[in-house]
């Protein structure tokens, strides 16, 4: 009975259960690891203030640009199931280094330790799920992605919920270094899940895995392939619209939460509580709604949910700029992204070639994402310098959602055309 319930909730078909549930478990560990760090990163951002945040985003963008060709070189040379553990364990080593420095290092290092940690976790937040979703797009067919990416996302949501809950309860008792070590242990569990993953459902991927072949290509293919493809460039525009809005909200979070809470621990606990609410709403939507929405409405209309929500939310925040309105908008926007925006966006990559699933996708998920951060960060700083209030900036951010909506509809139609043109297995 329990298995039938899981199959029905997840829209699974016979033979898909093990891969789907193991993917959800993999995603659980990956996001639990990150969400232990997320509230600590956001607390550092609040402490830095809106005047310093643009420089943190700039540092992240530069570091991402340097890392991307290195990552693409590893992808080009090693089989997928070998390079995934390597990428994750690099982050494990860096986190352990930070934990050791924070615990035993001299206090004179603290001025640069906070910004360095913020940059590391910002990159971590993009690389870890990008690698995961590239692997999923390389494992499941487009039709399976529409049905299953929602239930797979449940694993990540539960992981995020667990990570946020642990941080909100432990931040003021065990300390930051212990939380970092806990994050590392969870990421290693994600590595072990990836190593035990069943064979791909895609014949081309399965043949490549059996032959222990890499996806090949050059270290710059992630960039050059994006520039040559209108489809991938449109995904870039969609991503930019999302991240610019997210960065505007992040700056407003620094102002609103910083004004209400004065110390780092209380800010961390409050922000972790918001994370907890977001994940509770998200998991219910992913269990009962996401897969059916993508299947019934299609990719285009599912991608359109976030632009419409942002248009309404920024407009409301511009009129009523209170902490309560901010929390409601932030909760709805983030849960909408996890429940609908992210799964639908990942379906877009199921119809591109293998090299683009790892290289172009990673370039978009990291550098383009952080590029949107830069535009949002420096635009916010510039508008603030001109004397605009947070409410006025919110109203200025609302119209870009119309462009975002048009791009979403085009991408959804193009994905459908590409899926129909794919040869059947």
Image (cartoon, rainbow, N blue to C red):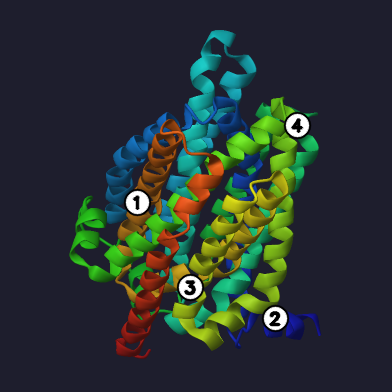
Residue highlighted by disc 4 = 266
State the image coordinates of residue 303 (x, y, percent, origin top left): 47, 72
Relative vertical location of residue 350 with respect to residue 180 in this rendering, above or below: below
The answer for how far apart the CA atoms under marks 1 and 3 are is 20 Å
Residue in the foreground of this view, choosing between 383 and 355: 383
Left-right relation of 169 to 348: right
Q: Which labelled disc corresponds to residue 368? A: 1
Percent x, y of residue 380: 44, 40
- Residue 250 to residue 381: above or below: below
Count of numbered marks: 4
Q: Quadrant of the C terminus?
A: bottom left
- In the displayed structure image, the side of residue 348 where residue 3 appears, left or right: right
Closer to the chain start, of discs 4 and 3, is 4
Q: Which mark is residue 9?
A: 2
Q: Is residue 337 visible?
A: yes
Which SS class for mark 3?
A: loop
**Placement of 190 over or under 174, stated as above or below:** below
Residue drawn where x is 33% and y is 47% of the image = 71
Q: Nearer the viewer, mark 2 or mark 3?
A: 3
Pointer 3 residue = 304
In the rendered image, residue 90, in percent from the top left (x then y), is placed at 46, 39
The answer to whether 372 is drawn above or below residue 92 in the figure is: below
Which sits earlier in the primary sequence, circle 2 or circle 3? 2
Q: In the image, what residue occupies the spot 64% across and 56% down?
A: 329
| Residues at circles 1 and 4 in contact by the CB criterion of under 8 Å | no
Q: Secondary structure at mark 2?
A: helix
């Amino acid at each position: 009975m329990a298995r039938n319930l899981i199959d029905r909730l997840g829209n699974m078909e016979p033979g898909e259960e093990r891969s789907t549930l193991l993917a959800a478990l993999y995603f659980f560990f990956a996001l639990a690891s990150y969400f232990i760090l997320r509230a600590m990163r956001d607390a550092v951002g609040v402490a830095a203030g809106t005047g310093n945040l643009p420089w943190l985003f700039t540092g992240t963008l530069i570091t991402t640009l340097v890392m991307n060709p290195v990552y693409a070189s590893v992808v080009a040379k090693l089989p997928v199931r070998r390079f995934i553990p390597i990428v994750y364990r690099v982050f494990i080593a860096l986190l352990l280094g930070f934990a050791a420095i924070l615990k035993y290092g001299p206090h004179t290092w603290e001025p640069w330790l906070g910004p360095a940690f913020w940059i590391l976790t910002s990159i971590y937040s993009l690389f870890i799920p990008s690698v995961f979703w590239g692997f999923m797009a390389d494992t499941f067919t487009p039709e399976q992605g529409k049905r299953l990416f929602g239930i797979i996302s449940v694993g990540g949501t539960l992981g995020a919920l667990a990570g946020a809950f642990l941080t909100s309860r432990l931040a003021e008792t065990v300390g930051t270094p212990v939380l970092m070590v806990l994050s590392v242990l969870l990421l290693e569990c994600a590595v072990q899940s990836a190593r035990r993953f069943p064979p791909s459902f895609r014949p081309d991927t399965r043949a490549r895995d059996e032959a222990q072949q890499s996806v090949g290509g050059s270290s710059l293919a992630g960039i050059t392939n994006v520039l040559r493809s209108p489809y991938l460039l449109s995904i870039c525009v969609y991503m930019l619209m999302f991240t610019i809005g997210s960065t505007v909200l992040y700056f407003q979070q620094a102002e609103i939460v910083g004004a209400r809470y004065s110390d780092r621990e209380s800010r961390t606990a409050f922000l972790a509580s918001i994370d907890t609410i977001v994940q509770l709403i998200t998991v219910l939507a992913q269990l009962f709604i996401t897969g059916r929405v993508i299947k019934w409405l299609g990719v285009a209309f599912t991608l359109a949910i976030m632009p419409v929500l942002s248009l309404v939310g920024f407009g409301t925040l511009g009129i009523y700029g209170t902490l309560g309105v901010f929390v409601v908008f932030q909760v709805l926007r983030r849960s909408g992204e996890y429940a609908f925006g992210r799964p639908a966006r990942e379906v877009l990559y199921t119809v591109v070639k293998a090299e683009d699933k790892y290289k172009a996708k990673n370039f978009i998920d990291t550098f383009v994402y952080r590029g949107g951060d830069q535009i949002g960060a420096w635009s916010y700083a510039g508008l603030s310098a001109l004397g605009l209030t947070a409410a006025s900036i919110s109203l200025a951010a609302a119209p870009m959602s119309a462009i975002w909506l048009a791009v979403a509809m085009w991408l959804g139609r193009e994905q459908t055309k590409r899926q129909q043109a794919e040869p059947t297995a």
